[in-house]
Image (cartoon, rainbow, N blue to C red):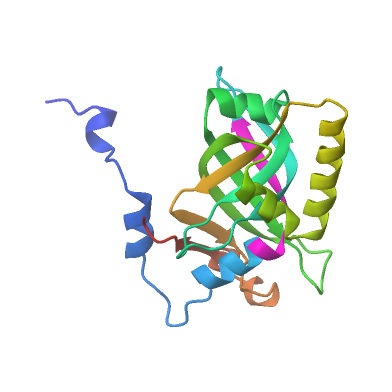
C-alpha cells in the first residue's frame, strides 16, 4: 500500500504543543513578561493577506485593551479604504511582530514578540478602542487627529481589533545578547494565553 503525504502529516495543536514542551528549570519567558512588553510598546508590523493570497505588511501604532483574566485584544486605528482594512474585510487572519528595543546595546537587533490572530473592523467610536488609545501618548495624538478629520467630513475611520491566537512566540525576550552569544536558538520562547 502506497502512503501519501497526507497520511504521514498529522494535524498538530499549537497550544498543546507549546504546553508539552519541556520547561527549563527557570522559566524566562512568562505570560506576565510578554503582556508587560506588549503594553509597554506601541508600534508593530501588522501583516494581512488579500483575497488573492497576496501578503501585505504595514507599520502600525497599537494599544492593548485592559487584561481580562489573561485575555487580550490589540487595537489599531486606521481608515476603511486603506489596504490593511480592505484585506481584513476579505480575510480576518493577521500576524503581528512587535519589536522590543534594548536600552543598552541599542545597535543590536531587538527582541521580538510574534503573534497571529483574527482581526475585525469596528467603528471608530467603539468605546473600548477609544479608551485604549486614550491610555498612551501617541494614541491620544492619533485619536485627536482622527477626531479633527471626522469633523472635516472623513467617515472611513475605524478600529481594528486583533484577538491573538493562544500561542504567542518570542525571540530574545527576557534574555541578554550576551547569554545568546553561543546558542542563539536558546532565545526562542512561547507563552500560552488562557483559554476562554
Is the C terminus in the top left, top right, bottom left or bottom right quadrant?
A: bottom left
Which residue is rendered at x = 51% and y = 64% of the image?
Answer: 189
SS majority, magenta: strand
Quarter of the figure that contains the N terminus: top left
Quadrant of the image occupied by residue 69 = bottom left
Q: Nearer the viewer, residue 180 or 19?
A: 19
**Residue placed at 55% from the left, 50% from the top?**
115
**Foreground pick, 140 / 97:** 140
Q: Residue furthest left?
A: 1
| Residue 5 vertical position relative to residue 19 in the rendered view, above or below | above
- Viewer can see residue 188: yes
On screen, residue 107 versus residue 194, left or right, reads right
**Is 167 left, or right, of 76 in this rendering?**
left
Q: Is residue 44 magenta?
A: yes
**Residue 171 position within the rendered picture, expressed as x and y whole percent measured from the top left:** 60, 61
Left or right relative to 20: residue 152 = right
Locate residue 16, reporting x and y percent: 32, 56
Compare residues 63 and 26 and report the one nearer the observer: 63
Residue at 32%, 48% in the rendered image = 13
Side (left or right) of 54 relative to 57:
left
Farthest residue in the front direction?
151
Relative vertical location of residue 171 with respect to residue 142 in this rendering, above or below: below
Q: Which residues are magenta?
A: 39-48
Q: How many marks?
A: 0
Question: On screen, 111 above or below 120?
Answer: below
Amino acid at each position: 500500500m502506497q502512503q501519501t503525504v497526507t497520511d504521514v502529516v498529522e494535524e498538530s495543536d499549537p497550544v498543546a504543543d507549546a504546553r508539552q514542551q519541556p520547561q527549563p528549570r527557570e522559566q524566562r519567558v512568562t505570560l506576565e513578561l510578554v503582556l508587560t512588553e506588549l503594553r509597554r510598546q506601541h508600534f508593530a508590523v501588522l501583516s494581512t493577506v488579500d483575497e488573492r493570497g497576496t501578503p501585505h505588511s504595514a507599520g502600525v501604532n497599537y494599544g492593548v485593551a485592559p487584561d481580562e483574566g489573561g485575555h487580550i485584544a490589540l487595537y489599531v486605528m486606521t481608515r476603511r479604504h486603506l489596504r490593511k482594512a480592505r484585506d481584513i474585510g476579505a480575510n480576518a487572519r493577521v500576524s503581528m511582530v512587535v519589536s522590543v528595543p534594548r536600552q543598552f546595546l541599542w545597535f543590536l537587533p531587538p527582541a521580538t514578540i510574534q503573534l497571529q490572530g483574527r482581526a475585525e473592523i469596528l467603528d471608530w467610536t467603539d468605546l473600548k478602542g477609544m479608551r485604549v488609545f486614550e491610555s498612551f501618548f501617541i494614541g491620544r495624538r492619533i485619536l485627536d487627529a482622527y477626531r479633527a478629520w471626522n469633523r472635516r467630513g472623513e467617515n472611513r475611520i475605524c478600529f481594528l481589533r486583533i484577538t491573538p491566537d493562544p500561542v504567542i512566540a518570542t525571540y530574545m525576550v527576557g534574555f541578554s545578547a550576551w547569554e545568546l552569544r553561543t546558542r542563539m536558538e536558546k532565545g526562542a520562547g512561547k507563552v500560552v494565553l488562557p483559554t476562554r
